[in-house]
Image (cartoon, grey):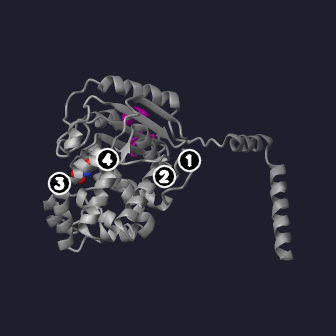
Amino acid sequence: MKHRQTGVLLALLAGIAQLSVMEPAVAQAASASKATSVKVSPVAPRKEQVQAIVTEAYNKFKNETRGKNADYIPELAKVDSKLFGIAVVSTDNESIAVGDTKTAFSIQSIAKVFSLALAMEEQGPEKVFAKIGSEPTGRAFNSPVAVVDMPTHTGNPLVNAGAIATVSLISAKTPAEKWNKVLGFYSRVAGEKLTIIDAVYKSEAATNTGNKALSYLLAKYDRIYADPFESVDVYTKECSVGVNAIQLARMGATLANHGVNPATGERVVKDENIPEILSTMMMAGLYDGSGGWSWHVGMPAKSGVGGGIVAVAPGKGAIAVFAPPLDEAGNSVKAQEVIQYVANKLDYNIYSPASVGLK
Ligand code: GLN
């Protein structure tokens, strides 16, 4: 015991000695950054720059009329197609919001990213890779043909079949316990308590025969790891969670910040899991539009049929756009245009010379 106390005392003295030899400017900066505890990202563009480009993008694309609301979930057809909001949250927790950024919309498929993160927290990346895989399907997100054709059957965690199988991997004694765990996790990633949009849940639960069919197909191949219909129900609930653009951008910023929520400071996702999550988003985040997206934009992203897209600039932050009308692949038309524009102007493309320090 005495020994340990001496050790602590010595360590303390060593620390004091080190402080006293610090350059005065360094010591001052260290204490200033402690006082404000603001972490400044070395790579994120400045707030004024982002504000100007985001406003420019908003004005440039606000009159875009192409695309159509999803209507296979009846409740989504009722959402005002003119709603349009853009939010950026940086890893320093600066946030910018233009347009309808306080309107809650259903997160839909974007939820799949965070269920993947939760399954990886529990099982580790290799087990998730073995049980789900991460290959592009080259087909629509709800394709039963992909389940039959793909060697893994599950495809990847961001198509419906793979996402339902991912949910089935999350441990819990009952479906209610699993749901609470999932919603609690999403809320920690968002840094705010999230809730379900009940009307969307009811609407999808009443019409999701296709997803139920996928779950039974997976069972045929032994690629679902809990009761199929219970897994579909938790999956349907996760898709019905309401977020606004700011909350969604913060969820993306938690990934950009290597798993630490920039607003709460809480580590929510293990940092070693972030590369696999982001690579899956790059490969399949926009379904069969992912190759073109990667080519033109170069940001790991995820879309949802509720009209949201979130795109991540690792180390810098995330941009989320909400605009309901979708293209053929099920991706918001305006959101894709806005993110491409902003990514080009602010060097968010992860492969750009500036992003890798060559400019
Ligand atoms: N809940 C939707 C579905 O299962 C999610 C699809 C999506 O956003 N692409 O069909």
Q: Amino acid at mark 3?
A: Arg
Q: Which residues are magenta?
A: 343-354
Residue at (34% x, 65% y) in the render: 175
Asked if the residue at label 3 sits under 8 Å from ligand 1, the reply is no
Of circles 3 and 1, the one toward us is: 1
Q: Circle 3 sits on which residue? A: 139
Vertical arrangement, residue 36 with respect to residue 162, above or below: above
Sequence-wise, the earlier of marks 2 and 4 is 2
Residue at (17% x, 54% y) in the render: 139
Out of 282 and 323, give the one closest to the viewer.
Answer: 323
Label 4 CA crowd tier, 10 Å (few <14, some 14–19, many 20+)? some
Question: Could you tell me if the residues under marks 3 and 2 are in contact, i.e. CB atoms within 8 Å?
Answer: no
Of circles 1 and 4, the one toward us is: 4
In this rendering, position of residue 28 left or right of residue 90: right
Q: Amino acid at mark 4?
A: Asp
- CA gap between label 3 and label 4 equals 30 Å
Sequence-wise, the earlier of marks 3 and 2 is 3
Residue 19 position within the rendered picture, expressed as x and y whole percent measured from the top left: 81, 51
